[in-house]
Amino acid sequence: MRTAVILLFVIVLCILNTVDLFAQIEGKQVYPVFEKLSAEYGLSQGTLQDILQDKEGFMWFATQDGLNRYDGNNMKIYRYNPEDKFSLPDNDIMQIEQDERGNIWVGTLTKGLFLFDTKQERFYPVNPGTITKQTADEIRMIECKGNKMWVLFDKDYCVYDISSVTLENIITSGNANISLLFSFNSLANTTGKKLTDEFGVFWIKWMPDNSIFMAWKDSVMMIMPQTVSNQQWKIAYEKSSAFGMDKNQTIFHFYPVGNGDSIVFIGISKLSVYSKSLHKVIYQKDFGKYNQLADNFYWYYPVFVNNEDIMFFDKLNCLSFNPRTQQFKRYNVDKTNPDGHFTSFANYKDRDGILWIGDIGHGLYKYNSRRELFSTDKPLADESIFIEDMLGNVYGFDGSESYLINRQNKKPQPAIPQKLLNGKWLYPKILCIDRKGNIWFRATSKQKFESLTRYYNTTTPQPSKRIFYQALALLKYDMHNGKVEDHSALLPKEVFGNVRYHLSVFTDNDNNLWQLIYGFDKNCRFEVADASTGKLKATYILPLPVQQADRDIFYFTHFQDAAGIFWFGTNQGLFSFNEPSNQWKLYKNNTADTSSLSGDYIFSICADPVQPDRYLWVGTNGRGFNRFDKQTGKCIQYSDKDGLPNNTVFGILNDDFGNLWLSTNKGISCFDIQQKKVRNFTFEDGLPGNEFIRGQFLKSRSGEMFFGSVNGIVWFNPKDLLESVLPGNNIFITSLSILNKPVDYKTDSSVISSPIQYTKTITLPYEKNVIGLGFALLQYTNPEKKHYKYKLQGFNDDWVDNGTNTTVTFTNLDPGTYQFYVTGSNSDGIWNEQGASLTIIITPPWYRTWWFLSLVVLLIASSLYATYRYRLYQSLKLLNMRNKIASDLHDEIGSTLSSITVYSDIIEEREKDKELEMIAGRISESSRNMLVVMSDIVWSINPKNDRFDNIILRMKSFAYEILETQNRQFHFEADESLNSIKISMNDRKNFYLIFKETLNNAVKYAEPKNVWIIVHLVNRQIHFTLKDDGIGFNTRQYKEGNGLINMHRRAKDLKGTLTINSQPGKGTEVTLQFPV
């Protein structure tokens, strides 16, 4: 079988190398642009034998040296690996197919059929049933439908039931068992056809009614199920002539259309459409004169384009056929394919409309069928514009003459019929169309040109351009009566000196002809004439603020709104002109006012599609575009910050759906006014180039948009582009690196146990905290228009714009759990809402583990508790000691001193000796003083008196005892907030003794009538003041005694300050401040 196909292929290349069978087929010309992928892009080998896009969106390519998976960024190749028992044993991959449940089936040339587990990247052999191993080893074709799969082996054709095949069962058993429904060799076959015949089967297809069609060399065999369960099958047979082919002509391919009632058959030299319900051919087309030597002609795999066109190839041609419209399109492949032609066994169209062509030996080609939404042609000449007549014909100018743009076959036709020019006029250039449909054009008088040439050749030589200018004429072509009128009298004199002084010609709403001229006086003026009569009506000077040094680049565009106001775009701003009142206004950029025009170079003006009476849209040179409010002169500015690819806006057109279309230096943009969103189109989408030209833009009566670029003109229907928005594409994480080294699950199973795109969580030690991730949005065109954003929760919860980059690296991640999210938008700006995610766990070092930190916390807590218990024990011990000392002082020393006092009183009363009486008095007084001191000491060390309210009570008691007995008034003031404060024993003793010494001194020396005692709490500091109205003293002359020295020492112990203020006759004030 394989030998027959190769032989057939070789014969075709030899015989038909110079034969074009499609010379008779006329249709729309398409100039496709193919992108080539070969070994340089990672493809394992240049001969493609099958192509598949799986349900997730990955592309698969079967080659003679391995199976390739492509994600748009990188190729992954599956080959035989002697160290991996689950690898493919044969690198020559013939077929790859995916069934409705997502199982991927792989057919090899010498080792049979395999089922591929994508989650573990394992290939499991498939048991083919009762057919011989020799037959089953060579796989030719595979096709799945529902729960059935047919396989074309080298020597048999089998249909299998695959409904019970699951990866779980295969993993358990180690291989896949499928149920054989029938084999071709075992069917009752009266046709005499055998798969081993020369050339054998050319094409097999499962039809919508579950029947199977086989194309043989001269006939079609139909295998039809006879029961609902498809357990019994029957063979039917028809000659190729029944389907519209010539007698014994080979049918190479066929395709069911719609529900399968119509079938397209493709033969050697003919294409036909057969209706099953009518049992007849309903359309047929000869490719060219039939040649007997072409009997070996071979058609390579056709594919569907745009869901209805069937595209098919031979060595030199690429055509598509639409069964519904019965129209052909010719693809000029030889002009775009670097190899000059395709020889393809594998073609495929993916879900985004990308056509993949697998060439034999030359690699893989991509063609974006959405490019056909744009029609292109050669560029217009510089400083020319598009012009449309009343019939919807659009004209351009190629530098020699104006021509009709043919939107079907792109064969230009003269805009002015040659018979009308009648040899009198040369180089016609259309200038405008008036309101009555007349064409105004400029041409050169042949007679005058020749006469001037002869004249100057015999007198003073003149440049040919100068002669050309002097021979110019202004003509009007009446399309209704076919007459041409000469209105050269309207041409300004400057034109005869240089036609470039003739800047613009257009008609207004009232059918007046306007000509803009750069005058010899360097002024710019409009000359207005009646387009019906050709009579001059008025002249207006364009009031430019700065006079132009020459005519180049100062005037760009004009627009007249529904109210009749003219708007002119220049290099000095936007002018408005009210002709009835002859009033001009100029609007310019003001750098200090963001509501002014963004720039002064005005390239384009367009009415707002929703509120044309209120707003204009104004495009600038390098400053974006503006929504201009005609009532206020205020603008809203838009630029590349709003999604525009480039800030130079050459042309602006509005469509019928509320959008603007803008031509720029980087393609064409569609601006959704309502949503404020921009969708960009570039060369990769089908434009002839990305750099467009000012002045070349037109919206036709049918709603088509025309734009001119440096590389050619383009026109399109906005509705087609607006409806062709692609849905969001799947996105996957496709690569992982750790410490800048790639990680593969088969060699780094300790890190990941499955391919990274199916891994949910990875766990890494803390020393491997430099992580790189790669990802891919599974769209295979315009990579520069795909955008990505990501976030790593736990590190940065905000989305990060990654632009077109498909990798990201995180360094020095702290131990913890992170959640990585990534999503992307396709070339139409549609974001994948689900995205891809990966949980990253960085384990901490042992000294930052939970158990170690828990142990540390436990040790610290234990230490703190032990310290607390120890200090509590010491505090209790100290309290007990203080209580014991106070008790002992009171009981032992106090009672003894009391006894001494009593005995000294008795001696004093009984003995009349004066000296003894004095001694006894001293003993009594000393013992009493000691009792007071001891009482103070006992009070100070008693823990019950630590609260400040007890201090205040003792101060009041002492002051009352001393002052009341001497008839002195005392005034006591203390904050209630002091009551709850506790101070230490030493601080309490020092404070009380300072108070006591101060009061004793006041009573003893000051002779006061009143004493004031004040205690306040201010900012955690005690403010104590004792003042009197006594005799006072001079602090400079006073020498401190032991009492004052002790008071200062005690104040220092309190970490406070003691201040004494006194003047003779004005009393004394003692102030103490210390912290608590």
Image (cartoon, rainbow, N blue to C red):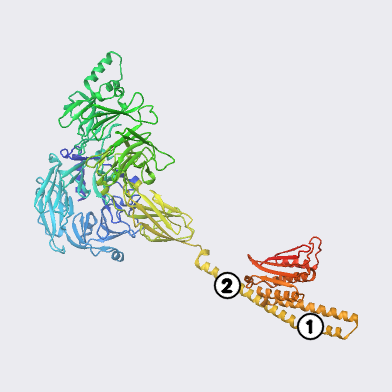
Q: Name the residue under label 1.
A: 898
Residue 374 location in percent, x, y? 26, 42
Residue that lies at the very extreme toward the top in this rendered image = 458
> Mark 2 highlights which residue?
862
* Mark 2 or 1, nearer chain start: 2
Q: Give whichever of 882, 766 is nearer the camera.
A: 882
Which residue is pictured at 44% across the width and 41% down the height?
A: 592
Q: Is residue 544 above or below residue 29?
A: above
Say whether marks 2 and 1 touch (CB < 8 Å): no
| Dot 1 crowding, Cα within 10 Å, few <14, some 14–19, many 20+ | some
Q: In this view, does 472 lie to the left or right of 208?
A: right
Give residue 45's position: percent from left, percent from top.
31, 47
The quarter of the picture where residue 146 lies is: bottom left
Q: In which quarter of the image is the C terminus?
A: bottom right
Residue 901 visible to an observer of this rendering: yes
Image check: 762 left or right of 364? right
- Residue 211 in the image, given as x and y percentages of width and height: 15, 57
Return the x and y of residue 975 as percentages of the image width and height: 64, 70
Q: Nearer the viewer, residue 980 or 9?
A: 980
Along the viewing direction, whichever of 548 and 404 lies nearer the viewer: 548
Circle number at residue 316: none
Q: Foreground: 60 or 649? A: 649
Q: Which structural element holds mark 2?
A: helix
Circle 2 or circle 1, nearest the eye: 1
Q: Name which residue type carries label 1.
A: Ser
Q: Can residue 369 be seen in this view?
A: no
Label 1: state its secondary structure.
Answer: helix
Residues at marks 2 and 1, CA–CA distance in whole angstroms: 52 Å
Residue 9 occupies which quadrant of the picture?
A: top left
The type of residue carrying mark 2 is Ser
